[in-house]
Amino acid sequence: MNPSTVIKNTDSSEELFLWRFIHSTHTPYAPSPQFRQWDNVSVSSKRIQSLKGEKWNRFRENHTSEELINLYDAGIQEADAQVGRLIEVLKEEGVYNESLIILTSDHGEAFGEHGIEGFHRGPPYEEVIHVPLIIKFPDEKYAGKREETVVGHNDIPHTIFDWTGIEGGFGLLGSSLIPVLDEGKGDSRFILSADNSNHQWMVRKGDLKYFVEDLERHCSNKYLAIDVLPQAYLVPEIIHQNFVDYEKELDGQLFNLRQDPVEKKNVVDKYPSKAFSLKRQLCRIYDKSPSVQFNSSSDREPSPELRKRLEDLGYLH
């Protein structure tokens, strides 16, 4: 059902939770024709929308990064128009001021920055995982405030819980962003990103970002054992003495995003202890948090309709 219709058919005295997924920026890039004002791609949006698998791959290979970016930007413009219309309806119904609105993206897109073109799977570089987060609170609370603290998607539900007074947290990772907005507290948090389809895991703290493939192969009790040692013993000499092989296993990538925002200089060999510390934290999250344990096998098969929707979104192949 159209979200505008849902809003109009809901009494203003009733509570409403509405989740809207906008597909126009997803592959294949097929924005509505009225938004294609700048690209010079001769293929119609209807034809692009029908491209799957190898046909889509050939389309990508036959067009330049600039052409693909223009199509992608048109999709952003279409998404912007849809969000604008939703806000108009909220204002028309007199519920905009009291509404909590959260705008974000599940991922970005790669356009050749690291040799990956027009796709969002693969290593978790910034072009894929650094996405916008805009929150409009009721009654203009925090209006105009811009926060530089790095946060994660898993902070969003806790922010909703905090604002609406829902207690418990339901065992989810993350924390409310309201203390960050009120007091600027958030620099010490770990940010996690995971793409189980490609076994890519990333953890970031401050400017340092570490990611690795096949995390399960790397995580074992020896990392957790270090974690429970008294803090005073967590020094490089002790680590070298007891786990002399840890540097050899650091085959992930470490970046200092302040010094290298485009992630071209992997410094994992230069700062092995920092990489190991982040890897240890990543393993602790992986081993101890059921909410991030994925299981690709299931006794339940999606219905044909659901499978088609997931395939269209790129989540099944």
Image: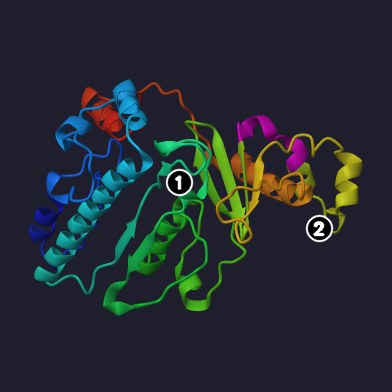
Question: Badge 1 local density, few (<14 within 10 Å), some, or many (20+)?
Answer: some
Report the residue marked by disc 1. Answer: 128
Question: Of the residues shown, which amino acid type is indicated by label 2?
Answer: Gln
Task: Name the spot of residue 194 as percent of width and height, x first.
Answer: 51, 41
Q: Is residue 103 left or right of residue 148?
A: left
Dot 2: few (<14), some (14–19), or many (≥20) neighbours within 10 Å?
Answer: few
Q: Which mark is residue 231?
A: 2
Which residue: 67% across, 46% down?
A: 266
Quarter holding residue 140:
bottom left
Q: Splitting the image into 4 quarters, where does residue 40 fall?
A: top left
Q: Is residue 170 above or below residue 53?
A: below
**Mark 1 falls on what kind of element?**
helix
Can residue 150 be seen? Answer: yes
In reply to whether residue 218 is colored magenta, the answer given is yes
Apparent side of residue 143 relative to residue 295 in the rendered image (left or right): left
Q: How many numbered marks, from 0 up?
A: 2
Q: Nearer the viewer, residue 38 or 286?
A: 38
Q: CA distance from mark 1 to mark 2?
A: 35 Å
Residue 246 in picture, x, y percent from top left: 80, 38
* Percent of width and height locating residue 106: 38, 47
In the rendered image, residue 105, in percent from the top left (x then y), is placed at: 36, 51
Identity of the residue drawn at 42% across and 42% down: 111
Tell whether label 2 touches label 1 (CB within 8 Å).
no
Image: magenta residue range: 213-223
